[in-house]
């Protein structure tokens, strides 16, 4: 495993395991399989409704707390200083831990300045080691940097070979914010697992298209949290630290970038309406 050092000195594994769309019932089993496959970082969220499953797997496996990096996210319906603070305590209880390694604002909507203040206070109280954001596009990220007084350690955004986030990554690198990819396998869209270029490059290294896609991100210093419910795919997705893509291969993969998200647009009024409806 390779690590990236976040602002403030916290070490985060470059590859973790995501549990979005893993049912509460399946979550403990998947997290256990992932930990047994070598993952040492788990990405959950209040909105995934499976924080309990993560906590259960960690407790049942007897994993030393400091060996596993836990990320969770404050949901929009808990936005605002008081509600976010209460939701952080609820997450701690569900995760059966007294600290969260990385806490993110899940979406850039609602009173996220209030949420951010609650997260800063939680960090000062020792309940959280590092704080960051998710789905903050270039304008909202810059707004928080300029006006909140605290630079996010991480911004977790849709990032994969078809949406490489190069401008955002460069912008955030100036402040030391690490780019973290959600959807690193594009959620299987665009036939990514059968992409001709990724397969051809993979064949040269004895690797799959999925492994090349993930490797191309971690090689750019982007943290990844692929999700799968299959143990053999967990092992496949983590086996990306024993080969290196050449500069020519990285250049070919750079050409797959369309510059646009495939899964959702956080600046689309219809998407914001959809999230607002979810919160009602
Ligand atoms: N912050 C946010 O707003 C946000 C949004 C979305 C996701 N996330 C986080 O990012 C994590 C990953 O993103 P994601 O779950 O959306 O998508 P993803 O990891 O890009 O793709 C997951 C999909 O790919 C399949 N898959 C995984 N590995 C495979 C392999 N080696 N070969 C073939 N198929 C494979 C999985 O199927 P099976 O499960 O059937 O194997 C699943 O359908 C999430 O779990 C979550 O923690 C965050």
Image: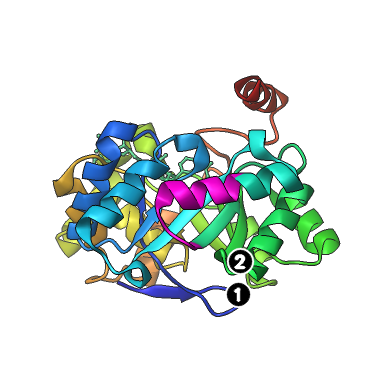
Q: Quadrant of the N terminus?
A: bottom left
Q: Which residue is mark 1?
A: 7
Answer with left or right where residue 85 lies relative to residue 245.
Answer: right
Q: Quadrant of the C terminus?
A: top right
* Picture coordinates of residue 38, whole percent (x, y): 22, 63
Q: Give the CA distance from mark 1 to mark 2.
A: 5 Å
**Residue 193 — which label?**
none
Give the magenta range. 87-100
| Label 2: how many Cα within 10 Å (few below 14, some 14–19, many 20+) | many
Answer with left or right where residue 26 lies relative to residue 50.
Answer: left
> Mark 1 near mark 2, Cβ–Cβ under 8 Å?
yes
**Residue drawn at x 52%, y 61% as measured from the top left:** 102
* Picture coordinates of residue 143, whole percent (x, y): 81, 55
- Whether residue 99 is in magenta: the answer is yes
Question: Which sits in the foreground, 279 or 211?
Answer: 279
Q: Which residue is mark 2?
A: 153
Q: Secondary structure at mark 2?
A: loop
């Amino acid at each position: 495993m390779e690590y990236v050092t976040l602002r403030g000195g916290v070490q985060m594994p470059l590859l973790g395991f995501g549990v979005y769309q893993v049912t509460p019932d399946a979550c403990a089993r998947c997290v256990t399989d992932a930990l047994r496959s070598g993952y040492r970082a788990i990405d959950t969220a209040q909105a995934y409704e499976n924080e309990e499953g993560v906590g259960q797997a960690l407790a049942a496996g007897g994993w030393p707390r400091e060996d596993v990096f836990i990320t969770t996210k404050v949901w929009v319906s808990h936005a605002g200083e008081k509600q976010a603070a209460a939701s952080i305590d609820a997450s701690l209880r569900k995760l059966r831990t007294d600290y969260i390694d990385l806490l993110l604002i899940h979406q850039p909507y609602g009173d996220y300045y209030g949420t951010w203040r609650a997260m800063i206070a939680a960090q000062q109280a020792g309940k959280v080691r590092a704080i960051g954001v998710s789905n903050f596009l270039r304008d909202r990220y810059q707004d928080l940097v300029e006006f909140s007084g605290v630079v996010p350690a991480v911004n977790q955004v849709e990032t994969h070979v078809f949406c490489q986030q190069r401008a955002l990554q460069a912008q955030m690198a100036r402040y030391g914010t690490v780019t973290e990819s959600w959807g690193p396998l594009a959620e299987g869209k665009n036939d990514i697992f059968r992409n001709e270029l990724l397969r051809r490059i993979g064949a040269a290294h004895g690797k799959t298209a999925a492994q090349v896609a993930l490797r191309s991100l971690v090689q750019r210093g982007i943290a990844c949290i692929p999700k799968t419910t299959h143990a053999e795919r967990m092992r496949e997705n983590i086996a990306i630290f024993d080969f290196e893509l050449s500069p020519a291969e990285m250049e070919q993969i750079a050409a797959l970038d369309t510059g646009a998200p495939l899964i959702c647009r956080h600046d689309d009024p219809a998407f914001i309406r959809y999230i607002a409806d979810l919160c009602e």
